[in-house]
Amino acid sequence: MHPVLVYTASRIGLFVVTLGVLRLLGLQNPLVLIIVTFLISGIASYVLLSKQRDAVSTRISDKIDRPKPQSD
């Protein structure tokens, strides 16, 4: 499976789980809920998803470094 898809799905999943937990803890204001969820899931993804992030950066770097075919 593509590392980009795995990383993106993991980030979305982490956001949804964080949103659910904060909602269950009683955070009611939708704007505050979204902002706090974004911050917490961002910090958690930085720590928890480092392997996936490294795989994505390697894939992108390999794609950029690959020589382009010469068309004559």
Image (spheres, rainbow, N blue to C red):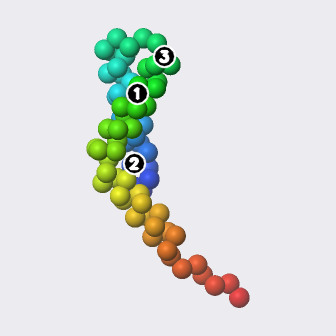
**At 46% across and 12% down in the image, what residue appears?**
29
Q: Does residue 4 appear anywhere in the picture?
A: yes
Q: Residues within 10 Å of mark 3 (few under 14, many from 20)?
A: few
Instruction: Give the structural element (helix, strand or loop) at label 3.
Output: helix
Q: Position of residue 13 (x, y in %)?
A: 38, 35
User: Vertically, is 31 above or below 44?
Assistant: above
Q: Evaluate if marks 1 and 3 touch, with contact meaning CB atoms under 8 Å apart.
A: no
Which mark, residue 7? 2
Q: Position of residue 15 (x, y in %)?
A: 40, 32
Q: Position of residue 30 (x, y in %)?
A: 48, 16
Q: Residues within 10 Å of mark 1 (few under 14, many from 20)?
A: many
In the picture, the quarter occupied by the C terminus is bottom right
Q: Evaluate if marks 1 and 2 touch, with contact meaning CB atoms under 8 Å apart.
A: no
Q: Is 57 displayed left or right of 24 in the figure? A: right
Residue linked to disc 3: 30
Which residue sits furthest bottom?
72
**At 34% across and 41% down in the image, what residue appears?**
45
Question: How far apart are the alpha carbons under marks 3 and 2?
Answer: 26 Å
First-in-chain label (3 vs 2): 2
**At 41% across and 57% down in the image, what residue appears?**
56
Q: Does residue 13 appear anywhere in the picture?
A: no
Residue linked to disc 1: 37
Q: Position of residue 42 (x, y in %)?
A: 39, 38
Question: How far apart are the alpha carbons under marks 1 and 3?
Answer: 10 Å
